[in-house]
Amino acid sequence: MALGLQSIVTIDGITAPMIEHAAARGIMRGTLLSRMTRIGRSDALALLEPATRSRKPVPPPTREEVIAHLLRTPAGRLATAKRLGDYASTYYGAA
């Protein structure tokens, strides 16, 4: 079924014209028409999805996450083994 601006669609249990669903999500008429041209007129949910991902800042990984990631890589395992060997030689060499 080809959707138009006045097509009645049900999204999240709300039945309304396509243009009203778009307006409720902050999508203006021109943007909706542009999306209908680019994406097609068959999937209402695809037309009303956010255009970009959220720009909410992502927190940096914790120290434990960084260490866990490094230990999964061959270079990280080698560096860790070398570092542990250096610590052991320093500790046991001084005794």
Image (tube, grey):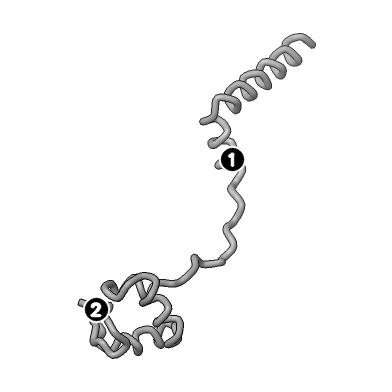
Q: Residues within 10 Å of mark 2 (few under 14, many from 20)?
A: few
Residue extending furthest right? 94
Residue extending furthest left? 1
Which residue bears the numbered disc 2?
2
Q: Secondary structure at mark 2?
A: loop
Q: Residues within 10 Å of mark 1 (few under 14, many from 20)?
A: few
Q: Quadrant of residue 28?
A: bottom left
Q: Position of residue 51 (x, y in %)?
A: 46, 71
> Would residue 22 be found to the left or right of residue 58 on screen?
left
Name the residue type under label 2.
Ala
Q: Residue at x 44, y 72 (%)?
A: 50
Q: Residue at x 60, y 25 (%)?
A: 75
Q: Quadrant of residue 46?
A: bottom left
Name the residue type under label 1.
Val
The numbered disc on residue 66 is: 1
Q: Position of residue 73 (x, y in %)?
A: 54, 29
Q: Position of residue 72 (x, y in %)?
A: 51, 31
Q: Residue at x 40, y 75 (%)?
A: 35
Q: In this orientation, which residue lies closer to the viewer: 54 or 5?
A: 5
| Vertical comparison of 91 with 72: above or below | above
Location of the N terminus (image quadrant): bottom left
Q: CA separation, marks 1 and 2?
A: 49 Å
Location of the C terminus (image quadrant): top right
